[in-house]
Amino acid sequence: MAEAILVVDDDLQTVKLIGLMLQRKGYRMIPATSGVQALAKAETEQPDLIILDVMMPDMDGFEVCRRLRSSPRTSAIPILMFTAKTAVADKIAGFQAGADDYLTKPVHPAELLSRVEAFLQRAARLKAEATARAQAATLGFLGVKGGVGTSTVALNTAVALALGAGHLPPTVRTPPPDFRPPAVILADLAPHGGLAYLLRLSQAFGLPSLLAYPPQELDPPTIEKHLTRHVSGLRMLLAPYTPRPTMLSSAHIRTIARHLATLGDYILFDMGHTLDDAARALLGELRYLALVMEPTALALVHARELIQLLPQIGWVPQQLGLVVVNRAVSGIALTRRQIEEALSLEPIGFISPAPELAHQAADQGIPIVLLQPEGLLAEQFRELARRLVSLTR
């Protein structure tokens, strides 16, 4: 079947000319002359590529691009922006909105066709890579608000997975010599590099280096070179813990997530606590999302609002779970039953309060599951890892 290309431009003559050019090469052209029409056709037609004009009266191409990237059904479709706006600032705005490439008018037909062919060949190659190996289990950890310990949960769960939790009997602490541990990668997409801080690492930050590449130039070997290996066998894509946050575009997020999925068996993402455009783009790449919350009334309000929002942006509720972190002993903490009844969602993990141990682990740069492997918290993280393995098989 011929590849389908959605051409979006309010100038009907431009749509016809591009469509004729594409049809002569054997492609199926889908026309759209407004942003609203483009969004509707992208959802229903699922084109292989979108050629998108920027200057349109009802909704400009930047906004169309952002909305396409925020929907899991359209977030993976390659977008080529095609516009007369030539300023560098406009190109940057296009990439930040989620475009994969930017082409300025006027353009020679041969150049446009070469870009189209390159996009479709790359998409076919990525699809073949994904088909050639078992799909990795991709999991995100998202805090319902700040300060709940999302990075601690993501790090210790990842280390537990890398050490074999979910693949060894629960009573086995030391894997046998012939045991092949799963390949686990943990990526830090939180704004301020919480993982590097917990590990007391002051360098080897791969994420900023990858963001220096245009998304279309990234590939699995390039990303592999920027991963940091931990003593547990865990590989990590880290960001610096500085007051200045790392700016993530949705195009980079999607590209990095897809390539990471070819490099490991389990790919975990620390998403911080903000459901911004980048986090929404990542949702389309996840098999499972764990919301991290405290057992308090305020956290319950935040969690309820977030759970109600997720289906509106295309997230499937069955792929959602709760991890409850009780950071301090308190008489006002909600019970498991109260949380389940209020949110109609069963928690998949409970982490007990241990502020002194958490502080000691962060101070020494050693994950809790390694610092005190026989302790209650380590077992709770291993149990969470086992639960996630069973949910994503």
Image: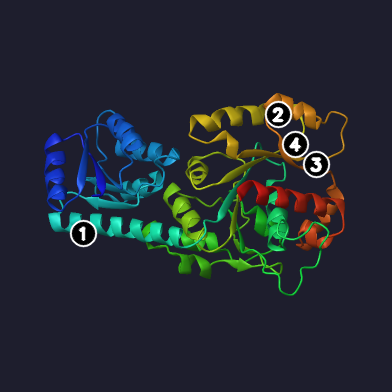
Assign a secondary structure to mark 3: loop
Q: Amino acid at mark 1?
A: Ser
Please state which of the two labelled residues, at mark 1 or mark 3, is closer to the viewer. Answer: 1
Instruction: Tell whether label 3 touches label 1 (CB within 8 Å).
Output: no
Side of 97 where 358 appears, left or right: right
Q: Earlier in the sequence, mark 2 or mark 1?
A: 1
The residue to which callout 2 is attached is 300
Disc 2 to disc 3, how far (Cα)?
Answer: 15 Å
Disc 1 to disc 4, how far (Cα)?
Answer: 52 Å
Residue 337 higher or lower than 282, as above or below: above
Instruction: Tell whether label 3 touches label 4 (CB within 8 Å).
Output: yes
Residue 213 shows in the view: no
Q: Earlier in the sequence, mark 2 or mark 3?
A: 2
Which circle marks residue 327 in the picture? 3
The residue to which callout 1 is attached is 114
Q: Amino acid at mark 3?
A: Arg
**The one of 289 and 327 positioned closer to us in this rendering:** 289
The residue to which callout 4 is attached is 294
Which circle marks residue 248 in the picture? none
Colouring convention used in this rendered image of the protein: rainbow
Disc 1 to disc 3, how far (Cα)?
Answer: 56 Å
Q: Amino acid at mark 2?
A: Leu
